[in-house]
Amino acid sequence: MPKHGLLGGFELLVLLALIRLGDDAYGVPISDEIEASVGRAVSAGSVYITLERLARKGLVSSRLGEPTAERGGRAKTYFRPTAKGLREVRLARQALMRLWHGVPQLEGGRT
Amino acid sequence: MRITKPPRLSTWLLERLAPRQNRESITGDLCEQVLRGRSAWWYRRQVFGTIFAGLAADIAAHKLLAVRALAIGLSGLFVIYGVVGPLVQETRMTLFRRWGQSLWGESEILRQLWVYYGLPFVAVTCLMFIAIGWMVARLHRRHLPGIVIVLSAMLLIPATFQTIETRRLLATELWPGWGWGSFRWALLFHSFLAVVVHPLSLLIGGLWAARSDADAA
């Protein structure tokens, strides 16, 4: 298990959104991606707080973009997963798959 | 309803109380979303969600600082309620006894504003609340600009007791000859001060400190 503990549910969602978006991952598309997958609105603040926490753990890196008029002259911050972040996502997937496997209640879409 | 510009007051709050590290990016993101057709209601919900998420994360990450901020704020409140309050009351009564007549002359309205509402002293108390909000926000500006919100909310605890007491007094026949109708309004006025004006003054002080901070950045 990693030193900083396992990834939380929302952390995993944010990291997966970053991986899917590639180089164009900043606040708006990240929120859109999560909203589309979970089916409900997410607060911009909670996305950024999670990104900040992931950055502290060394799982994502960020770079500042150019300010644009569309954003009232404010710059975008682009995020991308680090190699360590990708490894954590794989570990989380493996752990989830192991837990998933062979549970009759979760198979075939029946409760 | 679709809008073309983000609501000003919400933006003003966001620029002062959003998590410091990502303030510019969050403000820009929300601005961009508004131009893409999000409503004013959506924007306001995002602003308040962001401020409170940031506040909760800040407090969770800096528990000791949060306790210190609350301790400083509560000490300030103790000074107001325990020291300044009685002093103001005494000054008011002394002035009333010595120069009452010359202060308001024949005017019943001025007499009531002074005796029932204590208007000049209300301003002093509000200024003190503003000063506490400003001080707490200044001392904790690096991590906890939003702690002032918690402190303002805490003011609602004594305010609740005051409201209960006001209700009790309103139901009682007291001080005959003082003009019960006017006195009733004065009680309601003081309750309004405790529930709305004092917490708001504290908040204004905090936002003022955050503003000078945002302007300096």
Image (cartoon, rainbow, N blue to C red):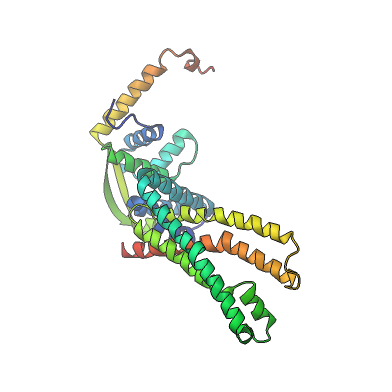
Q: Assign the N terminus of chain A to one quadrant of the image.
A: top left
Q: Position of residue B7 (x, y in %)?
A: 49, 59
| In the image: residue B68, left or right of residue B166 | left
Q: Assign the C terminus of chain A to one quadrant of the image.
A: top right
Identify the residue at image location x=60%, y=79%. Answer: B96
Q: Position of residue A10 (x, y in %)?
A: 40, 35
Q: Nearer the viewer, residue B44 or A80?
A: B44
Any part of residue B8 in sight: no
Q: Position of residue B63 (x, y in %)?
A: 37, 45
Question: Is A48 drawn above or below residue B201 in the view shown?
Answer: above
Q: Nearer the viewer, residue A4 or B215?
A: A4
| In the image: residue B9, left or right of residue B178 | left
Q: Nearer the viewer, residue B199 or A94?
A: B199
Q: Residue B12 lies in what quarter of the image?
A: bottom left
Q: Position of residue B37 (x, y in %)?
A: 49, 51
Any part of residue A103 in sight: yes
Q: Residue furthest left?
A: A83
Q: Nearer the viewer, residue A68 or B81?
A: B81
| In the image: residue A24, left or right of residue A32 | left
Identify the residue at image location x=47%, y=67%. Answer: B128
Q: Residue B141 lies in what quarter of the image?
A: bottom left
Q: Residue A71 lies in what quarter of the image?
A: bottom left
Identify the residue at image location x=71%, y=61%. Answer: B170
Question: Is A12 drawn above or below residue B117 in the view shown?
Answer: above
